[in-house]
Image (cartoon, rainbow, N blue to C red):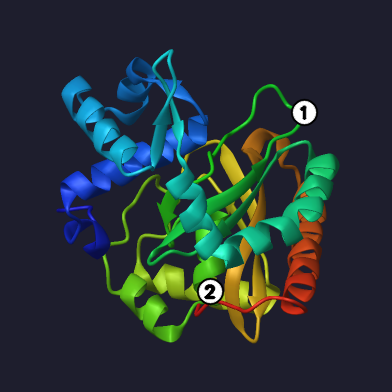
């Protein structure tokens, strides 16, 4: 049975690889060709040719030491998609507060298509911690952030996910439409989603949607190792991420135009 999503089946593979390479570079901020070959899992020739193309169009810069970094065209596109940057700015102090409270990784995510994508990350004090780089994606039915976003997505988005292939990553993944529908209803009622072991065994996510007029335009979470999530922290983190999400929504709604969610 194929585990690819409808979105993945419609991809142009060379374009998907080039965008993945650019996302990898953005996560590293600067990297050599050999590092990018290793991190992207593309061949040397593929990586070199894609970087040359991206460099020629201003998406990548290369210095005299042959170190690559994101180019000005990336910044220009980011400015044109300014709503997400405004969201990052509005959320930043509240992500810092969640880091201070938990000592864990804190993420901010949005929904492009049928995936959740990290747009900001605030790591904190634990030397052993889970990590998600900016730009990383997962299907919406997996983890705290994705399900939180899906619970407040448009009905047609929910229908698309529910009728698609719900890939099972662990025995705890919500891989049946019935289980996912039930969880979406619960998240809509409680405005928080706690997931343990459904993306990777031994990891947790406590997430809350950032909602405006009944639709989620973002989500925030605390993520870490499940061994550190006892009942007290579970309740504390749930209250904290829900409060942070509500505050971010209130701040952002005063001065921003909302995307179509």
* Quadrant of the rendered image containing residue 258: bottom right
> Circle 2 is placed at which residue position?
151
Q: Is residue 162 visible?
A: yes
> Circle 1 is placed at which residue position?
125
- Circle 2 Cα neighbour tier, 10 Å, few/some/many (<14 / 14–19 / ≥20): many
Give x and y (percent) for residue 198.
Answer: 48, 49
Nearer the camera: disc 1 or disc 2: 1
Near-viewer residue (138 or 3): 138
Give x and y (percent) for residue 178.
Answer: 39, 73
Residue 110 appears left or right of 173 = right
What is the secondary structure assignment of the residue under circle 2?
A: helix
Q: CA distance from mark 1 to mark 2?
A: 31 Å
Residue 202 appears left or right of 129 = left
**Position of 3 relative to 230 (above/below):** below
Near-viewer residue (37 or 124): 37
**Position of 109 relative to 133 (above/below):** below
Residue 122 appears left or right of 54 = right
Give x and y (percent) for residue 76.
Answer: 49, 54
Give x and y (percent) for residue 95.
Answer: 75, 50
**Position of 130 relative to 152 (above/below):** above
Q: Is residue 193 visible?
A: no
- Circle 1 Cα neighbour tier, 10 Å, few/some/many (<14 / 14–19 / ≥20): few
Q: Residue furthest top?
A: 65
Q: Who's the residue at 40% across and 45% down the image?
A: 170
What is the secondary structure assignment of the residue under circle 1?
A: loop
Q: Who's the residue at 71% across and 42% down the image?
A: 229
Q: Who's the residue at 27% across and 68% down the image?
A: 164
């Amino acid at each position: 049975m194929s585990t690819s999503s409808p979105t993945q089946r419609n991809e142009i593979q060379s374009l998907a690889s080039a965008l993945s390479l650019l996302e990898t570079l953005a996560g590293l901020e600067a990297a050599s060709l050999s590092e990018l070959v290793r991190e992207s899992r593309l061949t040397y020739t593929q990586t070199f040719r894609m970087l040359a193309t991206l460099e020629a169009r201003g998406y990548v810069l290369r210095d005299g030491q042959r170190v690559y970094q994101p180019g000005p065209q990336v910044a220009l596109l980011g400015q044109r998609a300014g709503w997400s940057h405004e969201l990052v700015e509005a959320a930043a102090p509240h992500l810092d507060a969640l880091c201070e409270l938990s000592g864990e990784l804190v993420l901010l995510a949005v929904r492009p298509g049928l995936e959740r994508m990290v747009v900001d990350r605030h790591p904190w004090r634990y030397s052993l911690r889970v990590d998600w780089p900016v730009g990383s994606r997962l299907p919406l039915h997996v983890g705290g952030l994705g399900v939180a976003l899906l619970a407040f997505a448009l009905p047609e988005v929910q229908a698309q996910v529910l009728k698609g292939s719900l890939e099972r990553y662990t025995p705890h993944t919500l891989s049946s439409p019935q289980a996912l529908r039930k969880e979406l209803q619960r998240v809509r009622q409680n405005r928080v989603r706690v997931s343990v072991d459904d993306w990777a065994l031994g990891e947790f996510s406590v997430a809350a949607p950032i909602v405006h007029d009944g639709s989620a335009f973002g989500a925030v979470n605390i993520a870490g190792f499940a061994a550190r999530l006892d009942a007290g922290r579970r309740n504390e983190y749930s209250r904290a991420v829900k409060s942070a999400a509500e505050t971010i929504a209130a701040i952002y709604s005063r001065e921003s135009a909302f995307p179509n969610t």
